[in-house]
Structures are given as structure tokens and as C-alpha cells.
Amino acid sequence: MTEAPIDARYGAPPPDLVMDDASGPRIQLSPFAPGSTALETVPDGGLASLVMLAPPGSLERRYVLAHGLRALAPGGRLVALAPKDKGGARLAGELQAFGCAPAESFRRRHRICILDRPAGDLNLQPAMDVGAVRIAPELDLWSQPGVFSWDRLDPGSRLLMDVLPPLAGNGADLGCGIGILSRHVLRSEKVESLTLVDIDRRAVDCARRNVTDPRASLLWADALTPPLGPLDFVVCNPPFHAEGSESRELGQDFIRAARRALRKGGTLWLVANRHLPYEAVLGAAFRRVEARADKGGYKVVEAVA
């Protein structure tokens, strides 16, 4: 970070909805962009302007908005937008609660709020506290609003852990989240190494605190792209939403990435919602595919490369 205020972007605001008048390129602050700058590390007043696609979750959205306003220099321009049904309807009110006076407009089912940061103190600290990293009581693990299933054990992971046998050799957890599956896998003394991969920096940071076994290594990366392997096993609870909408292709891409990482004879253990059509992709990529569990709307599959 330089000392002079800089221009920044959070996420990927639709370019046809935002007029960008920055004098140069904007730095990316989204935790879903590997290699980006963490918004929390930007010093107070370090930003000249910020264009933000606000997150859909209320705790996460207020946290990001508060940190964005903290990081803006007095008079710095904030452009924040969100789909109406994914937080946009609350956006102006949340900014007003901080002590700002946004101008609001509507376009293509998005609410767009524009303001110049007022000088002086704003009511930001409560939102920054509520959205910060903390121990999630139900999990007794480090987590943060905005990461997958941040405050509870999702039923898919629970089912996979119920049927997963002790694994051995070198493996990976693709889309590791905060490390719940990895902690279970590492109970096996026969596991030699485990690589945890997730595209969400916040999840990786939490997993680093939750998974302290020396056999584990962590990658902040798109699980579809890093060169892994040849591995003996992969465990995976793949995402099936992209930009807020269901994406069956995303889970299918995770299956193909797992196959690329596995040696011949290596095994993929996958859990997914029952309705997701992964069988054809599994059958095309693996020599043998067997259902190991089907319960509560979830299915667990073992696939041998």
C-alpha cells in the first residue's frame, strides 16, 4: 500500500451499472480474488474512492461497508450496489445508520448508492465487531460471517464425515472452508500430507488457525486451477452457487479438477445435494463410482480413478 490515497474495487460490480472515473487502475479488495489486498489491512483514509458490489449476507455486508468507509479518506467517493433481493433493498438504510447520506438510484434490479465520505467519526465499530473473525460457539472453531456455513456444521459435511473411512497417503481438500473436513481426515495417522485449497481468503485464514497439524498445508487459490498431485485421495464438498445463483457446472468442474489431481487408483470422496446431476460427469471421469450414503437430501459418492 502507498501512503497517497488510492482507488479500489471490492468484488465485480457490473461495469454497465457503474461509471468508473478513477484516474488509474483500481486495486482489488475482494477475498475471492487470490492475491488481492485485504480490505481490513488498508489504513484509515488510505482510499481515494471505492466501488463495491456489496455482499448478500447482512452481517458480512455491513462489515464490508463499515471497513470501506473506515478506509476512505474524507470526501472519498463510495459507490456501493447490490441486487434488490440480495441486500440492495437495505443498502441505503445501512449507510444512513453509519451516519452517511447516500444518493440512491435503481437500475436493472440493482440498488446503487453513491456518497462522499463525511469528515469526522462515523458509527462503524459495531458492524466491524459483529462481522469480524471469531470463535463460532456451535463449532468451537475460528470462523467469520460470509464464509460457507460460518456458524454451524452443514449437514453435507456431517454426512460425509459419518461414512468416511480412515484415509492414507497424500491428499487434498478442495473447497476446504474453515477446515472442518480436513480436521476429520487428519485423525488418520496414515495420512502423510493434506493440502487445503479454497478461493475465499477468509476461509483459508480461519482454516490456518483451526488446522494446526504439521501434515497440513494451505493454498488461497481457485480449487480448479492449482497443479496438485498425483494424489492418493481428494475429499470435497463442492460449492454449487456462483455469484448467488445455482451453478451445476461449478460442482462438475470440481469433480474434473479432483480427477486431474488423483493418481490412477486414487479415490474421490464427494458429498453433494441429492438433486445435483453429477453422476454422468463422475462416470465419464472415473473407472468406478459407488454411492456410499443418501440421507437428508444429501448423497456421498466414492469414485476411483
Image: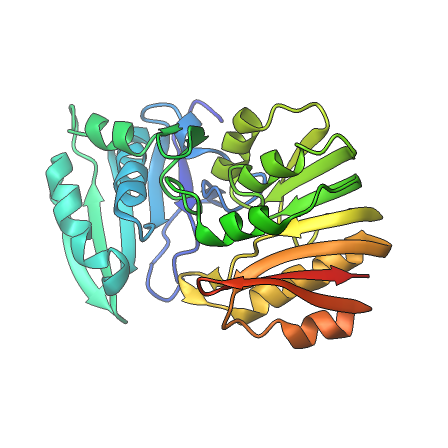
Q: Position of residue 174 (x, y in %)?
A: 64, 48
Q: Residue at x 17, y 53 (%)?
A: 90
Is any atom of residue 227 visible in this view?
A: no
* Residue drawn where x is 25% and y is 47% of the image: 58
Residue that lies at the very extreme toward the right in this rendered image = 264
x then y, percent, for residue 126: 20, 28
Give left or right: position of 250 versus 21. right
Q: Work out whether residue 77 or residue 270 is closer to the camera in this orientation and state it.
A: 270
Q: Can residue 146 be spotted in the picture? A: yes
Q: Quadrant of residue 106?
A: bottom left
Q: Is residue 236 left or right of residue 32?
A: right
| Left-right relation of 261 to 11 | right
**Camera-nearest residue between 120 and 132:** 132
Percent of width and height locating residue 124: 21, 30
Q: Where is 273 relative to 170, above or below?
A: below
Name above or below for residue 265 compared with residue 167. Answer: below
Please identify the residue farthest to the bottom as the structure is shown. Answer: 280
**Snapshot quadrant of residue 8:** top left
| x 62%, y 52%: residue | 236
- Here the colouring is rainbow
Residue lying at 48% horizontally and 25% vertically, measured from the top left: 2
